[in-house]
C-alpha cells in the first residue's frame, strides 16, 4: 500500500474518524455511500456551533 494512503489512515485513526486499527489494512476497500454520508454528517456536527443566537 502506498505511504500516502497509510498516512491518511493513521491521521484518521488519531483524529477519531476511524476507531479500529484494522481499518488501516482496508484502505483500498470500497465504501458504501451511506458510510460516506455518515462521515460528512459527523463532520458537520463537529463544525456547527453548539450555541444559539439570542437575536
Image (cartoon, rainbow, N blue to C red):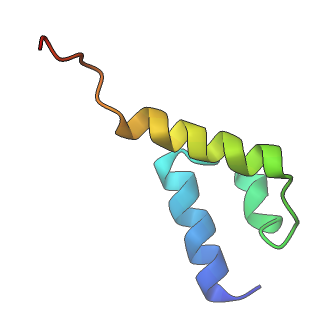
Residue located at (64% from left, 75% from top): 6
x then y, percent, for residue 44: 47, 40
Measured from the top left, where is residue 14 in percent x and y? 49, 53
Q: From where the camera sits, is residue 53 visible?
A: yes
Residue 13 higher or lower than 47, as above or below: below
Residue that protrudes farthest toward the top in the picture: 54
Can you give x and y, in whole percent of width and height, for residue 21 in the image?
Answer: 70, 53
| Rendered residue at 78%/54% (across/down) | 22
**Residue beneath the point at 88% across and 65% down:** 30
Is 13 on the left-hand or right-hand side of 49? right
Q: Could one spot residue 20 in this view of the protein?
A: no
Q: Residue at x 57, y 71 (%)?
A: 8
Say which quarter of the image contains residue 3. bottom right
- Foreground: 48 or 3? 48
| Residue 4, horizontal then vertical, whole percent | 59, 84
Q: Residue furthest left?
A: 55
Total tally of numbered discs in the picture:
0
The vertical placement of 28 against 10, above or below, is below
Which is nearer the eye, 33 or 13? 33
The N terminus: image quadrant: bottom right
Along the horizontal axis of the image, is 11 left or right of 38? left
Q: Quadrant of the C terminus?
A: top left
Amino acid at each position: 500500500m502506498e505511504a500516502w494512503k497509510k498516512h491518511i489512515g493513521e491521521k484518521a485513526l488519531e483524529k477519531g474518524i476511524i476507531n479500529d486499527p484494522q481499518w488501516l489494512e482496508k484502505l483500498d476497500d470500497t465504501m458504501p455511500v451511506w458510510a460516506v454520508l455518515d462521515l460528512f454528517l459527523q463532520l458537520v456536527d463537529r463544525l456547527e456551533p453548539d450555541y444559539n443566537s439570542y437575536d
